[in-house]
């Protein structure tokens, strides 16, 4: 499972325990958020048992994991991105998806022609 914008890991404390070891992969641009999430939301023993993998990048790329993902989650990531960055994100995610992958993403629709980048 790929988790794009895994952040503070609040929801992941409900998800990671159900996955087999080494099956959770999180991408987050802010390392400190994941470190705080491990400290406050997950337990160190759960990290030792489940062995999740994290990358700290801001381009949404998943291919560096070397895994074809069956599931991808991007909760409230694209709500905070202009279309140019969202397109980079979708491309970065798509490169690492298995043919029958299911991707779940949320977003809040904004103005039709937003001004800005990133």
Image (spheres, rainbow, N blue to C red):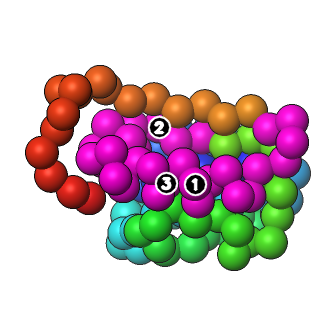
Give x and y (percent) for residue 69: 79, 51
Q: Earlier in the sequence, mark 3 or mark 2?
A: 2
Q: What's the mark number on residue 107?
A: none
Q: Is residue 94 magenta?
A: yes
Image location (x, y in percent) of residue 19: 81, 46
Q: CA distance from mark 3 to mark 2?
A: 13 Å
The residue tagged 3 is 89
Q: Is residue 117 left or right of residue 88?
A: left
Using the image, tell me which numbered label, if any, was put on residue 91.
1
Is residue 91 among the parts visible in the rendering?
A: yes
Which residue sits at x=47%, y=57%? 88
| Magenta part of the chain | 73-101
> Is label 3 in contact with label 2 (beta carbons under 8 Å)?
no
- The residue under label 2 is 75
Residue 45 in view here: no
Specify whether 2 is left or right of 118: right
Coordinates of residue 116 in the picture (x, y in percent): 15, 52
- Residue visible at 84% across and 48% down? 98
- Label 1 SS: helix
């Amino acid at each position: 499972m790929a988790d794009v914008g895994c952040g503070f890991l609040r929801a992941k404390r409900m998800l990671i325990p159900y996955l087999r070891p080494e099956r959770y992969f999180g991408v987050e641009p802010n390392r400190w958020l994941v470190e705080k999430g491990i400290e406050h939301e997950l337990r160190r023993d759960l990290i030792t048992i489940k062995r999740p993998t994290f990358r700290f990048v801001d381009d949404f790329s998943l291919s560096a994991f070397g895994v074809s993902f069956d599931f991808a989650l991007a909760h409230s990531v694209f709500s905070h991105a202009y279309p140019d960055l969202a397109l980079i994100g979708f491309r970065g995610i798509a490169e690492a998806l298995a043919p029958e992958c299911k991707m779940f993403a949320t977003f809040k629709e904004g103005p039709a022609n937003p001004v800005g980048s990133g």
